[in-house]
Image: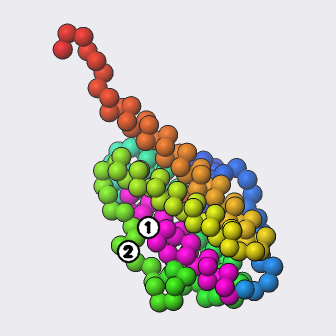
Amino acid sequence: MECDFNCKELNKYRADCPYPALKVKRPNKRYGNLLLEAYGGKYSETTAINQYVSHNFYSGDNTDLENAFRYISIVEMHHLDMLGDLIRKLGVRPEFRSSKQNFYWSGCFVNYDTEVKKMIRADIEGEREAIALYKKLISQINDEYVRDVLRRIIMDEKKHIEVLSSLYKKICNSNIKPHRPGC
Ligand SMILES: [Fe+2]
Ligand SMILES: [Fe+2]
């Protein structure tokens, strides 16, 4: 994906590994439908994008956190784009819904916390749920091309957990009041 954003900065928020080609062994509607869960289900890329955009409004004057929310949301957008392309190639229309027919994506899937530590905890939880979903999809989809893309996405989600966990630790440490003898 070409982007106008500072890609050097963006690279801090994705795994250092090329993305596989976006192709499928052969069209398979069942596999396409399964992938919809990661495209427009509860723990989908659509939820992740909206949650990071929403959390970014409350990153305050913490530039590291603001950058993390902004750039991670862009990486999630790339994931959504790759999944949509695979779903289409598998023979299914990429709609913002889960694998269940007529179960469309909802804004209620997004975490709307505004307190910094709560937001980061919710985001790490969302990343873990996404990884669990991708692992399940890898076990259900017998197409090595699709599996390669899902494995590569997992690498990015792990990177997001790493970045967010490190920011969380920094914020917790900065909240500890220094002990001043005599006070
Ligand atoms: Fe993602
Ligand atoms: Fe992620």
Per the rendering, the mark at residue 92 is none
Kindly check if marks 1 and 2 are in contact, taking CB atoms under 8 A apart as contact: yes
Q: Quadrant of the N terminus?
A: bottom right
Viewer can see residue 107: yes
In the image, the segment drawn in magenta is 29-55
- Alpha carbon distance from label 1 to label 2: 8 Å
Viewer can see residue 73: no
Residue at x 54%, y 63% (from the top left corner): 130
How far from the left and from the top, in percent, is residue 64? 46, 44
Which secondary structure class fits the magenta region best?
Answer: helix
How far from the left and from the top, in percent, is residue 85? 67, 78
Residue at x 47%, y 59% (from the top left corner): 126
Q: Going from the N terminus, do you reach mark 1 or mark 2 first?
A: 1
How would you rate the neighbour count of disc 1 (Cα within 10 Å): few for under 14, some for 14-19, many for 20 or more? some
Indicate yes or no whether the magenta region holds residue 165: no
Per the rendering, the mark at residue 50 is 1
Q: Which residue is mark 2?
A: 107
Residue at x 36%, y 46% (from the top left corner): 117
Residue at x 44%, y 37% (from the top left corner): 169
Return the residue found at the far top.
Answer: 182
